[in-house]
Amino acid sequence: MSNLYTLRESEFYAWQVARLGSSERMDDVLAGLLWAIARLADDFPLVPDTEKLRVAESTRFLHDDGTPLRLRIWFVVASENEVDLLAIEAEPS
């Protein structure tokens, strides 16, 4: 059974989020991913050849400019109630 995790942002993650910019759709997709990580962090797949690194990936969505994007967040489950958010990217898809 999953716990409710506290999400801790690394400086690099916060910097990357700031670079993504803000739009209603991007904010909604990001909020949905963070909600899922906070509740189901241990259910996300491990990155191959790592022991702790996990990745959460959004479905494809259209950015305000019409570009199809997909968000990915890399994180580790640091303890039974904390997740460290390490990096995020918006990749054209």
Image: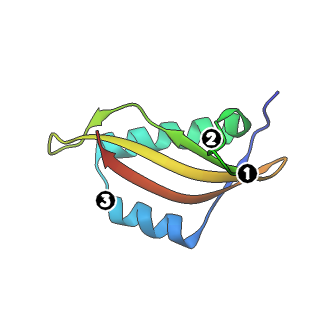
Side (left or right) of 12 relative to 44: left
Dot in front, 1 or 3: 1
Please say if 12 is above or below 72.
Answer: below
Q: Position of residue 11 (x, y in %)?
A: 55, 72
Q: Position of residue 35 (x, y in %)?
A: 58, 38
Q: CA distance from mark 1 to mark 3?
A: 28 Å
Which residue has dot 3 on it? 21
> Residues at badges 1 and 3 in contact (C-beta under 8 Å)?
no
Mark 3 element type: loop
Crowding at dot 2, Cα within 10 Å, few <14 / some 14-19 / many 20+, comes out as many
Mark sitting earlier along the chain (2/3)? 3
Mark 1 element type: loop
Q: Position of residue 85 (x, y in %)?
A: 61, 57
Please say if 4 is above or below 12.
Answer: above
Residue depicted at 33% across the width and 32% down the height: 60
> Residues at badges 2 and 3 in contact (C-beta under 8 Å)?
no
Examine the image and state in which quarter residue 44 appears: top right
Which residue has dot 1 on it? 52
User: Which one is nearer the viewer's eye here, 67 or 27?
Assistant: 67
Which residue has dot 2 on it? 37
Examine the image and state in which quarter residue 3 appears: top right
Q: Position of residue 6 (x, y in %)?
A: 72, 51
Can you tell which mark lies on residue 44?
A: none
Q: CA distance from mark 2 to mark 3?
A: 21 Å
Q: CA distance from mark 2 to mark 1?
A: 14 Å
Q: Quadrant of the N terminus?
A: top right
Residue depicted at 69% across the width and 34% down the height: 40
Mark sitting earlier along the chain (2/1)? 2
Please say if 75 is above or below 46.
Answer: below
